[in-house]
Image: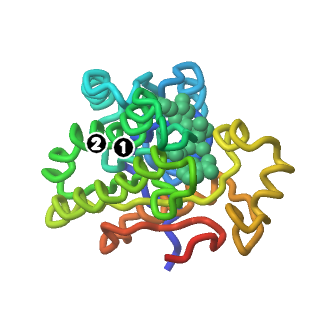
Amino acid sequence: MAENLDPLRGRVAWVTGAASGIGRAIAYKLAEQGARVGVIDLAEEAALHVAEKLGGSAIACDVSDAGAVRSATRDLEQRVGPPDILVNAAGIAHGEAVAGHDERSWRRVLDINLTGPFHFTREILSGMMERGFGRIVNISSGSGVRVGAGAAAYGTSKGGLIAFTRGVANEAAAAGVTANAVAPGLVDTPMTRQAMGDAEQLASAARSSDIGNPMGIVLQPEDIAHAVAFLCHPDSRGITGQVLHVNGGSLMP
Ligand code: NAD
């Protein structure tokens, strides 16, 4: 039997954080597989650029702002349609020790990385359940499972996101809606370049024993997009409440 090359034809996918890095690669991948894509990001111009390239629709939205998410939802429902797929990839990195941790930076990390996915899921979940099909994928992190020093806020947001994913998975399971998390290891994106330096420094980190992986590879955003597309595939209907680690083997829970 011929393989269906555009398994997401006729589906609508909303991707947050789709103007850059992992979210952008996911948006391209889902569009390549036939989905009509809503590109959601704080960075308006970059989001427009991505939407233009993949023939989707862009919307500027701060995922931590409940009101902005509500109006973005109404707007995207009109422009691309209600989502069959929601990927929450918008996020920020943050490093700070717990002793003396700044209150505002703690809240900011949780507001974006954890409450952001809650905001979008809250808006779209009942529609997905009524239509009897849905795929929700939250981009967590290996740091949500193994939290290094200085990563308490980030790790808490990403570990919380795994718990949130499982709560959603249980609530929506009987309606044909799955919810899973993808937990990337070290991926070459603007976020990691800013935190860790150029390609050479990333490559050496990938070979180091503390944050590296046995494959010694720096993952690319497309590696994460591939895992997300797998979970969004109509045939992945039996996979829910799971965490798919894509990390070159750095963490084998
Ligand atoms: P990135 O900085 O390249 O992209 C993040 C995107 O999110 C940007 O376009 C940014 O504008 C957007 N964004 C940030 N705050 C936002 C907000 N409040 N509202 C809407 N959009 C917002 O980073 P990335 O590396 O591609 O990260 C994507 C996701 O993957 C994040 O959730 C990150 O925590 C996670 N992650 C990344 C890595 C890695 O190694 N890069 C590893 C594990 C997990």
Q: Foreground residue, 9 or 40?
A: 40
**Exactly how many numbered labels are in the figure?**
2
Residue shown at 69% from the left, 58% from the top: 219
Residue type beneath disc 2: Phe
| Residue 172 image position (x, y, % from top left) | 18, 59
Q: Which residue is mark 1?
A: 114
Q: Which residue is mark 2?
A: 118
Residue 248 drawn above or below residue 62: below
Side (left or right) of 228 relative to 196: left
Dot 2 falls on a residue whose secondary structure is helix
Residue type beneath disc 1: Leu
Q: Is residue 62 visible?
A: yes
Residue shown at 39% from the left, 54% from the top: 137
Side (left or right) of 178 relative to 148: left
In the picture as drawn, the residue positioned furthest to the bottom comes out as: 1
- Quadrant housing residue 208: bottom right
Residue shown at 29% from the left, 54% from the top: 164
Q: Is ligand 1 within 8 Å of the beta carbon of the residue shown at mark 2?
A: no
Residue shown at 19% from the left, 64% from the top: 170
Other-residue count near label 2 (Cα within 10 Å), few / some / many at <14 / 14–19 / ≥20: many
Residue 166 drawn above or below residue 88: below
| Residue 211 image position (x, y, % from top left) | 68, 61
In the picture as drawn, the residue positioned furthest to the right comes out as: 200
